[in-house]
Amino acid sequence: MTRTRETDRLHLRPYVDDDAPRVLDILSRPDVIRFLGSPVPMADLDAAREWIDSKRRREAADPFDLARAVVVRATGVVAGTVSVSRCHRRGTGEFVGEYEVGWTLHPDSHGHGYATEAARALLDQVVEQGLPEVWCGVFVGNDASCRVAERLGLTYVGVGPDPWWDGDSHLYRVSAGDWSASSPSASGS
């Protein structure tokens, strides 16, 4: 299993404890978390460390449940997170084999194409590892993330009740076969 991934501009890697201050800076911002499934600002460095630990535990339990620090190679700055997450159905908590790609960036990293580049590389990875399908749910009103999903070439399913979180979302999906047939690889590895 590949734990890191390189693109022309980015290094995707598991989070480390030293990332906690940047995680806190990103996930304590109401303007960043308003479109996340549970939009409660992160409280402190202990919460950031627990968040990092939870990502490690999730990946240890399921090799497709990945969260990667998106590091800008030119500066070494963590721009944010790209993830493929195991999804549990709202209401039942049941896992029915669905995974969702997502991204969260610090405002100082918006507008550079990092989310698209990082998500493309992570999708390449999980498809190579055998994940048959990936979903993307984007809450209504999050137009920037809809544009990322469209640049990725994910198939638009429509707007409806989000199956994993409260609220309505624009839903996208891509099968491994469709991804492999249409996506130029963003990674050099």
Image (cartoon, rainbow, N blue to C red):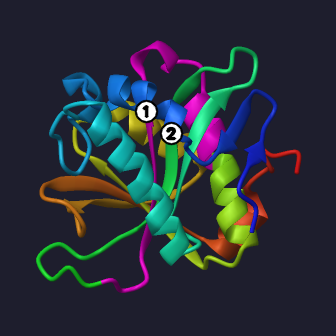
Residue drawn 19% across and 32% down? Answer: 43
Residue 48 placement, left or right of 30: right
Residue drawn 40% across and 41% down? Answer: 146
For the N terminus, which image quadrant? bottom right
**187 vs 90: above or below:** above
Find the magenta span and give its range.
Answer: 95-119
Is 110 part of what is drawn in magenta?
Answer: yes
Q: Quadrant of residue 151?
A: top right
Amino acid under disc 2: Asp
**36 vs 175: above or below:** above
Q: Position of residue 187 (x, y in %)?
A: 81, 46
Residue that protrudes farthest toward the right in the picture: 188
Determine which residue is flagged by label 2. 17
- Residues at marks 2 and 1, CA–CA distance in whole angstroms: 6 Å
Residue drawn 27% across and 41% down? Answer: 47
Q: Position of residue 59 (x, y in %)?
A: 52, 66
Residue 69 placement, left or right of 3: left
Residue drawn 46% across and 13% down? Answer: 108
Amino acid under disc 1: Ala
Q: Position of residue 182 (x, y in %)?
A: 74, 59
Query: Of residues 138 and 51, which is closer to you in this image?
Result: 51
Q: Quadrant of residue 156?
A: bottom left
- Tags 2 and 1 touching, CB below 8 Å: yes
- Look at the numbered disc 2 and give the secondary structure of its residue: helix
Q: Is residue 173 visible?
A: no
Q: Quadrant of residue 140?
A: top left
Q: Is residue 14 visible?
A: yes
Is 100 part of what is drawn in magenta?
Answer: yes
- Mark 2, Cα crowd under 10 Å, few <14 / some 14-19 / many 20+, is few
**100 vs 148: above or below:** below
Determine which residue is flagged by label 1. 20
Q: Position of residue 179 (x, y in %)?
A: 68, 64
